[in-house]
Image (cartoon, helix red, strand yellow):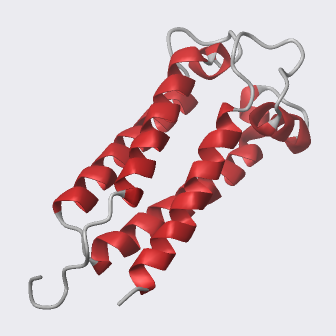
Amino acid sequence: MTNGKQVRKNYTLPAFYIIAFLITLFIISTDQNLKTDFGSVKPYFIHWYILAATGVVDIIVAIVILARNNKTTQTLSWMWALLMILIMVGDILTYKSVGFTTPSQFAQYLFGITKYPQTLNYIPGLYDVLFLVYIILLSVGISASRKK
């Protein structure tokens, strides 16, 4: 312990951030719609770069927590998870930029567990799993930052 600010080493948060990174990596590797804006952009669409950047932040957060596990890093951890939840839900509002006519259509594509009709190859449900990981990170992070 250093100055009473260091907390017990907990690998749960970094582990879940690594899981989030791996899921993100899998999504950006397999989702042809994300890569090409449903076939209209070559080689990569802006949403692909944004998701890739969030994956990089996930790894950075995991490393920071492992290197310096204290209340501040735990708070920043759950704040990043909350921001990612808001970004993922807010992504639905970009429905027009990807060619959907309603937000509910894009939400069905993003959060659906079956393949959306007339789309390129992707694995339905991965976005849901990533969203769930961030919800877990939010709850675990808040819990960890409240412990004395």
Residue drawn at point x = 46 percent, y = 69 percent = 141
Residues 3 and 29: in front is: 3
Q: Along the horizontal axis of the image, is 57 left or right of 26?
A: left
Residue drawn at point x = 58 percent, y = 16 percent = 30
Residues 67 and 97: in front is: 67
- Residue 120 picture quarter: top right
> Is residue 12 depicted above or below 101 in this figure?
below
> Is residue 45 depicted above or below 13 in this figure?
above
* Residue 29, x across and y down, in percent: 51, 17
Residue 83, visible in the rendered structure: no
> Is residue 32 depicted above or below 86 in this figure?
above
Q: Along the horizontal axis of the image, is 133 left or right of 14?
A: right
* Residue 58, x across and y down, in percent: 39, 47
Residue drawn at point x = 25 percent, y = 78 percent = 7
* Residue 146, x across and y down, in percent: 44, 86
Residue 73, visible in the rendered structure: yes
